[in-house]
Image: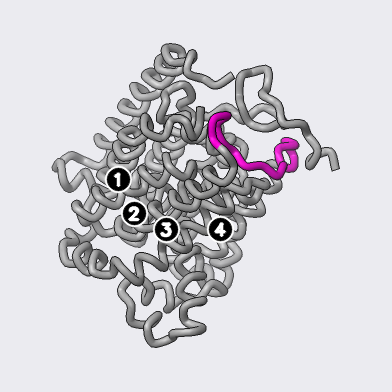
Amino acid sequence: MILPLYGYELISDAQGLLVALVLGFGFGWFLERAGFGSARLLTAQFYLYDMSVLKVMFTAIVTAAVGLWAFSAVGWLDLSLAYLTPTSIGAQLFGGLLLGAGFIIGGYCPGTSVTAAATGSGDGFLFLGGFVSGLLLYAVAFSGLELWANANSLGPLTLPQVFGVPYGVLVLALVAMAALMFAGAEWAERRFSGMRPR
Amino acid sequence: MSALTSPAITRADGRFLAGGDRHMNPYLAGFGLGLVLLASFLIMGRGLGATAASGSVVAWLVGLVAPDWAATNPGLKGYYAEPPWINWTFYLIVGAFIGSLASALLARRVRWRIERGPQLGVPARLALAFAGGAVAAVGAKLAKGCTSGQALTGGSQLNAGSWIFMLAVFAGAYALAWFVRKEWR
């Protein structure tokens, strides 16, 4: 096993920062290619006439999930060296609801607001400004929530552990679920095409 | 500079972005994004993220005026330990900014704009963009990640908390969509 390279100390911290620049370029590139610098395209997801957000997100998730499974199954990747954000059910439920609210009110999520700002969107810049201010607001007013979230943390937890199902089986289930969702998305776009602004 | 002067029009294919070429097929763009995410795992042992980049900048700025507070506040101290110039996610987001700009230049989509529906004024749209960003920040901080760091990254790792987060994001946005429909349509 030699992957992840950084975990096996095959690349240095400084090289890692260079890798981040290159990966970031690809990240921004594909977000922009998909049209995700546009608030109206992104929010169209929630009026059902353009499901690009769901299609891009779940294709990316499935691609990476299958890749992670395959690389670890053949013994090239040590998944235990990949960082897994700890699960804290209440915090992630409540935090997710707030992020969804911020998304539909502001038009972006943090990553796509960078894409919007980079391509000349004034509202993208304002969203970023609001995001930075919100982090400061959190530090000033909501630090208690952070302590609550950490106190209720279940630690790193994966769905195969929760359901007691083998990893590969769950990856297969994910692929099947995504295929169903894509079919649903195509149907929804046809059904709600009249909602599209002219 | 044709890139900066492309007209603000609705495209013939029905997309409502200003000018520029067609978007990439969403499944193809998602596949590309997934390969970038996978490469990040294989090389660095971590996925993509966006929140920590802003957090690092905020904590560094706060640290200029109140270093003791930045170093002990539960919402800042993690970021304060890694100022932007050594923060991995900061470099990722600088790269994302450049990559987005490069892609948009190539597609002739770079244009100064305030995106909004026809029934909403510019000041209201900017206020809502700012407010939305602030609400999203509180959510992302609480959930330890955003659409990138939780939904994409944790989603592909089959991280239990990330899937809870992802469902909650969609639930929150769908629940409010009707109330803010005039902002977009």
Asked if residue A30 can be seen in this view, the reply is no
Image mark 1: chain:
A
Does dot 2 land on a helix, a strand or a loop?
A: helix
Disc sitting over residue B46 in the figure: 3
Asked whether the residues under marks 4 and 1 belong to the same chain, the reply is: no
Quadrant of the snapshot with the N terminus of chain A: bottom left
Disc sitting over residue B93 in the figure: 4
**Left or right of A148 on screen, residue A140:** right
x%, y% of residue A103? 42, 43
x%, y% of residue A74? 37, 46
Residue drawn 25% across the image and 50% down it = A94
Asked whether the residues under marks 2 and 3 belong to the same chain, the reply is: yes
What residue did someone put label 2 on? Answer: B139
Amino acid under disc 1: Leu
Amino acid under disc 2: Gly
Rendered image quadrant of residue A15: bottom right
Residue drawn 45% across the image and 55% down it = B49
